[in-house]
Every structure is written in structure tokens, then in C-alpha cells.
Image (cartoon, helix red, strand yellow):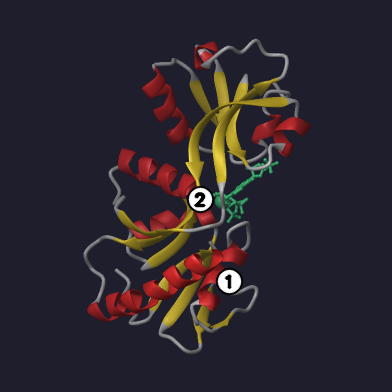
């Protein structure tokens, strides 16, 4: 679908993955001319363009072949893959490298006052989350009848607002949970940022050669930081 001869890399425009992803591209020698408001940024020394978008859009752009590569959190990638599978949309991709940033976990957390022993305690309950497909998959694996309630923001206030009994949200330090009177109980998914490539079979030889030339540099940067 992507006709451009230039390699298109989808990257979060502004958020937790942006700076580290840009830093990695720069570290492998790609010079970038990024203007804050623009969707597209061009490299000045390689045939590469950046598509600067919301992270939610990155898996779909790669799976539809609109972007050739993408930097994305595994949480978002796996959720979108499940969502697209459920509606019979293309959902293939290849993970080129697992990166050393964006680390977090998707966890179930419950109000401190809730009587929680294990996941069975959620039988018949409502759990607010931005990741309904990952959560429903976990409920199915655990054979629990509970309901995922989709919220795109403010998930951590859902129990206090009476919208849900518990939540399933991303956690890194745990400070947000604590500030909202919630206790982390079950980790359902561990995530890091990954570099993915489209797997629709339509990558041109020129682009694949460029990717193959860049990847050893990525490995060099990752190794140097270990
Ligand atoms: O605007 P756009 O849609 O692009 O951005 P976004 O707001 O959806 O995403 P953003 O930038 O917040 O996160 C992008 C990705 O960073 C996520 O998909 C994860 O892969 C990764 N990541 C790593 C995190 C966190 N750590 C994280 N702590 N994403 C979100 N959080 C949030 C979490 O949702 C909760 O609100 O931080 C809060 C918890 O943090 P602690 O430290 O208090 O536990
Ligand atoms: Zn997002």
C-alpha cells in the first residue's frame, strides 16, 4: 500500500515513547528534521520519513502496510492485534527488536478495602480498562466471568466513581495506584517498546536492504547500553 520509495517509520508524536525512539534513530546515524506540529518528518541523510502519530494508530498503520516500521509498546501492539483479529482486519507484523525502554506492566488493581484473595474474587465484577481485549483474554484463560468496561482515560478513578469494581491499567512505579487507593494484585502482561516491521509481503527490495543495513547499528546501540 505504501508506494513511497522512502522508508516510512511510524513513531509516537508526543508521549512516553517519543524521546527514546527519536534518540535511537539519531544514535544509528539518521539525521532528522522534526518540526513540532507536522505529521511527517524527513531524514536529511537517508531515504526515511517519520509518520508522527498517536501510539494507538501505530499497530494498524504497520499491519495495513501504510508504515514500513513502527516503534510501539507491546501492550498496545497486542491489544490492537487482538482487536483487528476479532474484526478480520490484517493483523500480521514482525518484531525486529525488543527495545530497552517503555517498560511497564498491565495489572489488575482493586480498592484497598476490597476483600481480594485471588482472581476468583472478581467473579461477576466489572473491571475498567483501556485494554479490553487483553483483559477479556485473561478472564477467559482464568475461566472467570467478569466484565471489561472500556475507558480511554481516568481508569484509576473508576472504582471511586462507581463505574467499576476494579481496574486493569498500566503500572510502572505504582504511585498512581497508591494515590488512588488501589492495590496491584495480578500482572496480566509485561511490556516494553518494540520495533516492528510490516509483514504483508509487499516490502520493496530497496527498503528491505535499507532495513538490513540499519539493524546491526540498532544492535550496536542496544549492546553499548547494556
Ligand atoms: O497521545 P498518545 O495516544 O500517543 O499517548 P498515550 O497517552 O496513549 O500513551 P503514553 O505516552 O502515556 O504511553 C505510551 C506507552 O508507554 C504505553 O502504551 C506503554 O507501552 C508505555 N508506558 C510505560 C506507559 C507507562 N510506562 C505508564 N506508566 N504508559 C502509561 N503509563 C501510565 C499508566 O497508564 C498510569 O496512568 O502511567 C500511570 C502509571 O504510572 P506509575 O509510575 O504511577 O505506576
Ligand atoms: Zn495512546
Residue 131 in the image: x percent, y percent?
Answer: 50, 37
State the residue in front, 182 or 49. 182
The quarter of the image holding the N terminus is bottom left
Say if 149 sits above or below 222 in the image: above
Q: In the shown orientation, is residue 165 left or right of residue 139?
A: right
| Mark 1 neighbour density, 10 Å: few (under 14) some (14–19) many (20 or more) | few
* Residue wearing tag 1: 23
The answer as to whether callout 2 falls within 8 Å of ligand 1 is yes
Mark 2 — residue?
Answer: 192
Quadrant of the rendered structure where residue 118 is? top right
Residue 9 percent across, percent down from the top left: 44, 70
Q: Position of residue 23 (x, y in %)?
A: 58, 71
Q: Is residue 10 above or below residue 100?
A: below
Query: Residue at position x 39%, y 66% from top?
Result: 69
Question: Label 1's element?
Answer: helix
Mark 1 vs mark 2, CA separation in Å: 16 Å
Q: Secondary structure at mark 2?
A: loop
N-terminal label among 1 and 2 = 1
Residue at 69% x, 20% y: name it: 111
Say which residue appears at 70% left-offset and 32% top-offset: 177
Q: Residues within 10 Å of mark 2 (few under 14, many from 20)?
A: some
Does 223 sit above or below residue 213? above
User: Do we see residue 67 in this rendering?
Assistant: no
Residue in the picture at 53% in, 57% down: 100
- Considering depth in this image, is 70 or 193 the residue closer to the camera? 193
Amino acid at each position: 500500500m505504501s508506494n513511497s520509495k522512502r522508508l516510512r517509520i511510524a513513531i509516537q508524536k508526543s508521549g512516553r515513547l517519543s524521546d527514546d525512539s527519536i534518540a535511537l534513530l539519531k544514535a544509528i546515524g539518521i539525521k532528522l528534521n522534526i518540526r513540532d506540529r507536522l505529521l511527517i518528518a524527513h531524514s536529511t541523510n537517508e531515504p526515511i520519513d517519520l509518520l508522527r502519530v498517536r501510539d494507538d494508530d501505530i499497530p494498524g498503520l504497520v499491519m495495513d502496510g501504510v508504515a514500513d516500521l513502527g516503534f510501539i509498546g507491546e501492550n498496545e501492539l497486542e491489544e490492537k492485534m487482538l482487536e483487528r483479529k476479532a474484526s478480520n482486519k490484517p493483523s500480521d507484523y514482525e518484531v525486529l527488536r525488543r527495545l530497552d525502554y517503555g517498560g511497564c506492566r498491565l495489572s489488575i488493581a482493586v480498592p484497598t478495602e476490597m476483600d481480594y484473595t485471588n482472581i476468583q474474587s472478581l467473579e461477576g465484577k466489572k473491571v475498567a480498562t483501556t485494554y479490553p481485549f487483553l483483559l477479556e483474554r485473561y478472564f477467559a484463560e482464568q475461566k472467570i466471568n467478569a466484565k471489561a468496561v472500556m475507558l480511554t482515560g481516568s481508569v484509576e478513578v473508576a472504582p471511586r466513581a462507581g463505574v467499576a469494581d476494579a481496574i486493569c491499567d498500566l503500572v510502572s512505579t505504582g504511585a498512581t495506584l497508591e494515590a488512588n487507593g488501589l492495590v496491584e494484585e495480578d500482572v496480566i502482561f509485561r511490556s516494553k517498546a518494540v520495533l516492528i516491521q510490516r509483514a504483508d509481503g509487499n516490502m520493496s527490495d530497496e527498503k528491505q536492504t535499507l532495513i538490513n543495513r540499519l539493524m546491526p547499528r540498532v544492535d550496536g546501540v542496544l549492546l553499548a547500553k547494556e
